[in-house]
């Protein structure tokens, strides 16, 4: 139509950033309209966190059953019905995305299906297949997320050269898979397919998998990858891919030597780009950085102060909980509250085998910030629960300030690290000292006792250590 729809708060994008921001703004009494061009739930619920964790859990179960012999569980002829697994995974996704729709509805949020484009500093055009309408807003929260980056040498064809989106929706387990990029997404999906029976080769350009992660942590993972028959090459630069019939050959420069790898599919997971190029933000004067991420302050405001940006489009870390956290802050600022972001206790999780999770500062980062650092590492093999779960691998490392013994950071690699990190996140958020954790009674036998022992280690009196 020609007239503009007048709305109060307009949220663009219905991922974990946008839908959470919309609900929080509605809770605070604002009238909210949310525009989504695809499916509610965004990348995370539809083609990210949730489907990947579903496949990882199913693959993990298959793997554990095959290896349960040493626990006296004889599970012979364990097999995988992959179509059934996909069906189950799709059911999980459907249940959650339907739930988001219901939540928006019960919070009286208007959902508009279509693609938004900024046509002014207080308005967007929303295009659907049939029509296009203008929405004038008082405040806007932009949460359009990110998309898989493409490699010029290996353009996606959706079939042989694929992104994580297609990798999550394969209809059969590939016999061989090449993963280009050993970041967390490539590592998680590569490991899952290996457990389902694929022969997986990971090619990483840097000198270790999970570039930027503590090498002591990564070593636990790479040792395990070898057991799972996942091959990986570091310092491997992919130069080209040739698709011939139903296979693809990748040519790479590995430590200065040309090598070729052939597989059914190549998963390219080399990072993600912000969805800011077709949005009209620059045209209305919203500043982006040189990579296309929207520049924001600690209130999530762009330089156009009634336009906010949250989630993946504001830059790394590209994590769902970071998007939701920023969404709540933006909604609270819009509602007049004194809210601002503080990322000190951000959890980072990799659903590798075993899992990795960390928060706060690493020893190196803490030293670089000028702290006099003390740290203590306690191993999972010394923990009764880890042993009794047949999952005793890895460690918890606690980093503290030597003088005040305040916890600065915690790194975990081991069973259920993704859940264990919550205690460390809370310790840092509350400004806890090693003594606070040491004096907290931890149930026995449980995995969190490893965090308690590491904290006692900082104080010089861990019990179960030589
Ligand atoms: P998105 O989730 O990308 O949502 C943006 C939404 O905006 C989309 O629905 C899109 O359709 C819509 N949109 C875009 N442009 C427009 C427009 N012009 N008009 C209207 N709508 C528009 N994170 C974790 O924390 N834990 C994990 O375990 C994890 N696993 C992942 C696994 C994979 C394979 C991938 C790819 C990602 C994973 N992530 C994980 C990252 C996580 O998915 C993202 O950080 C998160 O989805 C970002 O949320 P967002 O709201 O910023 O954007």
Image: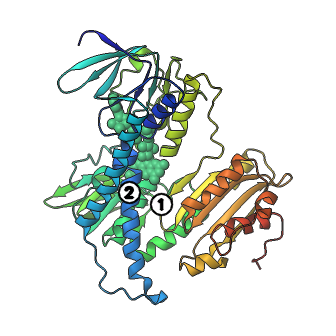
From where the camera sits, is residue 446 visible?
yes
Quadrant of the frame with the N terminus? top left
Secondary structure under the numbered disc 1 in the rendered image: loop
Q: Most extreme residue toward the front, as rendered?
A: 106
Structural crowding at the residue carrying mark 2, measured as other residues with C-alpha within 10 Å and reported as few (<14), some (14–19) or many (≥20) = many
Q: Which numbered tag is attached to residue 367?
A: none
From where the camera sits, is residue 381 visible?
no
Q: Nearer the viewer, residue 249 or 426?
A: 426
| Mark 2 within 8 Å of ligand 1, using the beta carbon | yes
Q: Which numbered tag is attached to residue 52?
A: 2
Residue 66 image offset from top left, x and y in percent: 38, 81
**In the visual, does 78 lie left or right of 18?**
left
**In the visual, does 153 lie left or right of 450?**
left
In this rendering, is residue 323 above or below 264?
above
Verify CB contact (< 8 Å) between mark 1 and mark 2. yes
**In the visual, does 341 lie left or right of 179?**
right
Residue 78 image offset from top left, x and y in percent: 31, 81
Q: Nearer the viewer, residue 347 or 371?
A: 347
Structural crowding at the residue carrying mark 1, measured as other residues with C-alpha within 10 Å and reported as few (<14), some (14–19) or many (≥20) = many
Cα separation, mark 1 vs mark 2, equals 9 Å
Residue 395 image offset from top left, x and y in percent: 63, 69
Q: Nearer the viewer, residue 184 or 58?
A: 58
Q: What residue would you read off at disc 1?
A: 351
Residue at horizontal 56%, vertical 52%?
Answer: 348
Q: Quadrant of residue 183?
A: bottom left
| Mark 1 within 8 Å of ligand 1, using the beta carbon | yes
In this rendering, is residue 461 above or below 152?
below
Q: Quadrant of residue 179?
A: bottom left
Quadrant of the frame with the C terminus? bottom right
Q: Quadrant of ligand 1?
A: top left
């Amino acid at each position: 139509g020609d007239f503009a729809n007048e709305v109060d708060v307009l949220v663009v994008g219905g991922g974990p950033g946008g839908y959470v921001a919309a609900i929080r703004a509605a809770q605070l009494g604002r009238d909210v309209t949310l525009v989504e061009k695809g499916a509610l739930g965004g990348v995370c619920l539809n083609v990210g966190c949730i489907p990947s964790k579903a496949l990882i859990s199913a693959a993990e179960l298959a793997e554990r059953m095959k290896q349960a012999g040493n626990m006296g569980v004889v599970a012979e002829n364990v097999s995988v019905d992959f179509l059934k697994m996909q069906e189950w995974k799709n059911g999980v996704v459907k249940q959650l995305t339907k739930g988001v729709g219901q939540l928006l509805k019960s919070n009286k949020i208007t959902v508009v299906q279509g693609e938004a484009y900024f046509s002014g500093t207080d308005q967007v055009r929303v295009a659907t297949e049939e029509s296009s309408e203008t929405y004038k807003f008082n405040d806007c929260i932009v949460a359009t997320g990110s998309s898989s980056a493409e490699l010029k040498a290996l353009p996606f064809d959706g079939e042989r050269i694929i992104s994580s989106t297609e990798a999550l929706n394969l209809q059969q387990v590939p016999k061989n898979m090449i993963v280009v990029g050993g970041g967390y997404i490539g590592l998680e999906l590569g490991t899952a397919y290996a457990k389902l029976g694929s022969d997986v080769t990971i090619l990483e350009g840097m000198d270790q998998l999970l570039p930027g992660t503590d090498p002591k942590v990564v070593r636990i993972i790479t040792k395990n990858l070898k057991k799972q028959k996942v091959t990986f090459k570091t310092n491997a630069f992919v130069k080209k891919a040739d698709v011939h019939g139903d296979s693809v050959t990748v040519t790479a420069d590995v430590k200065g030597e040309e090598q070729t790898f052939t597989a059914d599919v190549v998963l390219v997971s080399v990072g993600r780009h912000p969805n800011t190029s077709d949005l009209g933000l620059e045209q209305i004067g919203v500043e982006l950085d040189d990579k296309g991420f929207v520049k924001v302050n600690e209130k999530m405001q762009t330089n156009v102060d009634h336009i906010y940006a949250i989630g993946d489009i504001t830059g790394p870390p590209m994590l769902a909980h970071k998007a939701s956290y920023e969404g709540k802050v933006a909604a609270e600022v819009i509602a007049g509250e004194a809210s601002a972001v503080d990322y000190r206790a951000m959890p980072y999780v990799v659903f590798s085998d075993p899992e990795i999770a960390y928060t706060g500062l690493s020893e190196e980062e803490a030293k670089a910030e000028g702290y006099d650092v003390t740290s203590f590492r306690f191993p999972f093999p010394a923990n009764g629960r880890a042993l009794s779960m047949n999952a005793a691998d890895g460690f918890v490392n606690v980093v503290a300030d030597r003088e005040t013994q305040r916890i600065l950071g915690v790194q975990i690699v081991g069973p259920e690290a993704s859940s264990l990190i919550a205690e460390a996140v809370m310790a840092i958020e509350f400004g806890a000292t090693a003594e606070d954790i040491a004096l907290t009674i931890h149930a026995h036998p449980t995995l969190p006792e490893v965090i308690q022992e590491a904290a006692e280690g900082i104080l010089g009196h861990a019990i179960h250590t030589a």
